[in-house]
Structure formats: structure tokens, C-alpha cells
Amino acid sequence: MKSHVLARRALDQRLSALRGSEALARPPRGWVKAVREALGMTTGQFAARLGVSQPRIPALEKAETEGRITLNSLREAAQAMNCTLVYALVPNQPLEAMIEARAAAVAERRLAAGGDGGAVEDRGLTAYGLVTERERLIDELLCGNPKRLWDEQ
């Protein structure tokens, strides 16, 4: 089996526990403020631990809720509260399912456009022949380099 397939499956397995998890949803007022308040830490105390002025803390917390905070700022805030910043992109569905769906969409587009031997109507394919050709194209796309799947719009 190709290394990219094994890597994709391993990553999928790691991410499956996170997919759809309510625990990942950012609190309405942000993680920084939620953790700071849960620890009973004032903005002044947090500022001192972070090495910034007290007015910087509300600005930092606002930046997080507005999606303007940098990863570095989040990492520093986490360290100041003895936390670990966890950063991940969690696909909404399994990676394998995303690859298969993309291969099916590319195959459908190619069949409709006639990119693989002429338009469907011109080739006179039966319904069974069309399904068979679609499956052949999908298999060909899945067996090849997955980078090809993303070349077509």
C-alpha cells in the first residue's frame, strides 16, 4: 500500500476522536478568558505572569473572540496559565471519505464533459456501462497520486 494512503489512514485515526466533539467549540468569551476566570486569576495577575501591561489582557481576549489572535500569542497566554496550546485542523468527515467523494466528483465531471473518450451520449453507454465506467474512473483516480484529484475545479 502506498505511503500516502497509510499516512492518511493514520492521521484519520488520530483525528476521529476529535471529529464532531463539542469539547472543541470555543467558549463564547474565548478560551483565554474562560481559563483565566476558572483559575480565579485577575487581568492584572495574568498580565504580570504574561509580562505585559494590564490593559493588554482585555485586548488579547477580545482578539481571540474576534479571530484575530496569533498562534504565538495563544501559546504565550497558555504558558502563562500553565496550559498547553492544542492546535489542529479536524476534517468534518473521515479523510478517506473526502478522498473517495472527490474522486467520484472528478469522475462524474469527466464523464459529463466527455474528457475520457467523448461525451456519454456520443459513446452510447448503457446505464450499466455508465456505472462501470464511473467505477473504473474512480478506481483509477484513487490508485493514482491523490494530488491529481485537486487539479480540477
Image (spheres, helix red, strand yellow):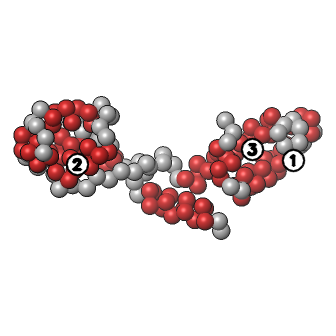
Element type at mark 2: helix
- Residue 53 vs 1, above or below: the answer is above
Q: Is residue 26 left or right of residue 49?
A: right
Q: Earlier in the sequence, mark 3 or mark 2?
A: 2
The answer to which image quadrant residue 4 occupies is bottom right
Q: Looking at the picture, how far across and down is residue 92, in whole percent?
A: 48, 46
Q: Earlier in the sequence, mark 3 or mark 1?
A: 3
Q: Residues within 10 Å of mark 3 (few under 14, many from 20)?
A: many
Q: Quadrant of the N terminus?
A: bottom right
Residue 59 falls in which quadrant of the image? top left
**Nearer the observer, 37 or 77:** 77
**Which comes sooner in the sequence, label 2 or label 1?**
2
Q: Secondary structure at mark 3?
A: helix
Q: Which residue is mark 1?
A: 129
Please name the amino acid that badge 3 sits on. Ala
On residue 107, the disc is: 3
Residue topped by disc 2: 76
Residue 37 visible in rendering? no
Would you say the residues marked 3 and 1 are in contact, meaning their CB atoms lie under 8 Å apart?
A: no
Task: For the residues labelled 2 and 1, say whether their Cβ atoms are less than 8 Å apart.
Answer: no
Q: Residue at x 16, y 51 (%)?
A: 80
Left or right: residue 125 compared with residue 150 = right
The residue positioned 43% from the left and 48% from the top of the image is 89
Name the amino acid type tagged 2: Glu
In this view, the mark in front (3 or 2)? 2
Q: Is residue 128 left or right of residue 105?
A: right
Q: How many marks?
A: 3
Q: Quadrant of the C terminus?
A: top right
User: 133 or 77: which is nearer to us?
Assistant: 77
Q: How many C-alpha atoms fall within 10 Å of the one at disc 2: few (<14), some, or many (≥20)?
A: some
Three-letter code for the amino acid on which mark 1 is drawn? Gly
Q: Position of residue 22 (x, y in %)?
A: 34, 46
